[in-house]
Image (cartoon, helix red, strand yellow):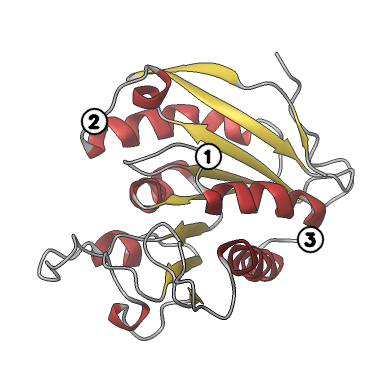
Amino acid sequence: MTRTVRPTLHPTPAGDARITWHHATTGTARAVLALGHGAGGGIEAPDLQALAARLPARGITVALVEQPWRVAGKRLAPPPRSLDAAWTALWPELAAPGPPVVAGGRSAGARVACRTARTTGAHAVLALSFPLHPPGKPERSRLDELTGVGVPALVVQGGRDTFGRPDEFPPGTELVVVPDADHGFAVRASAALGREAALAAAAASAGEWLDRVLPPARPGRGATPVSR
């Protein structure tokens, strides 16, 4: 079981953001995985929750980040520059525990993680349901955000995601495909794996990727943050 502390509020230029920590259960965290949500939902998204439930057992502390617009109860996300400013302002809090910080998120949150990776000094990027383009508009590509991260990146994508199917990503993209899944990782009733099992498998693949890109944990590093 993951061990969580109460969510904490932190000021940003766009208002207060909220972080919910799911601490590594192995004693010493090897990394912090910071995950942002999409434009149509919050940290309750099944893929974010699957990672928060499973990765702490692998020595990864998962920090679920709620953008200020969600904390304030607004229905519409602000422009990208506001999302990026809030995320960047939170980075010192995310980095405070000591281990390397991997930036990530789903959909719009994945874009934020990609756009800010160089500025924040993220160790790597985990992009869930990366919105390669608006549905039905492949000419409006956002590929440059993904290819410009400058650090190792993994994309976890549904096989029938209308925001970008796996075969639309260029060769060389490191991909984990969730078969029969849509943008929200819902799967068809006829799928070989149900949603929960498919997300568990995707979380395991993400954990294996983190094992490859993270440095070995050093003694004395990785203390988990204190609840305030």
- Provide the residue designation for mark 3: 216
Give the alpha-carbon distance from disc 2 to disc 1, as whole Å. Answer: 20 Å
- Look at 77% across and 33% down and name the residue there: 224
Quarter of the picture holding the C terminus: top right
State the residue lying farthest toward the front: 189
- Provide the residue designation for mark 1: 44
Residue 32 percent location from the top left of the image: 66, 44
Q: Amino acid at mark 1?
A: Glu
Give the alpha-carbon distance from disc 2 to disc 3, as whole Å. Answer: 38 Å
Determine if residue 21 is in view.
Answer: yes
- Above or below — where is 14 with respect to 169? above
Quarter of the image for residue 149 reads bottom left
Residue 162 percent location from the top left of the image: 27, 68
Q: Secondary structure at mark 3?
A: loop
Mark with earlier residue (2, 1): 1
Residue 89 percent location from the top left of the image: 43, 27
Horizontal side of 116 relative to 221 (left or right) equals left
Q: Amino acid at mark 3?
A: Pro
**Front label number (2 vs 1):** 1
**Front label number (3 vs 1):** 1
Horizontal side of 81 relative to 139 (left or right) equals right
- Provide the residue designation for mark 2: 78
> Crowdedness of circle 3 by 10 Å Cα count: few (<14), some, many (20+)?
few
Mark with earlier residue (2, 3): 2
Closer to the camera in the image, 136 or 82? 136
Mark with earlier residue (3, 1): 1
Residue 215 percent location from the top left of the image: 72, 61
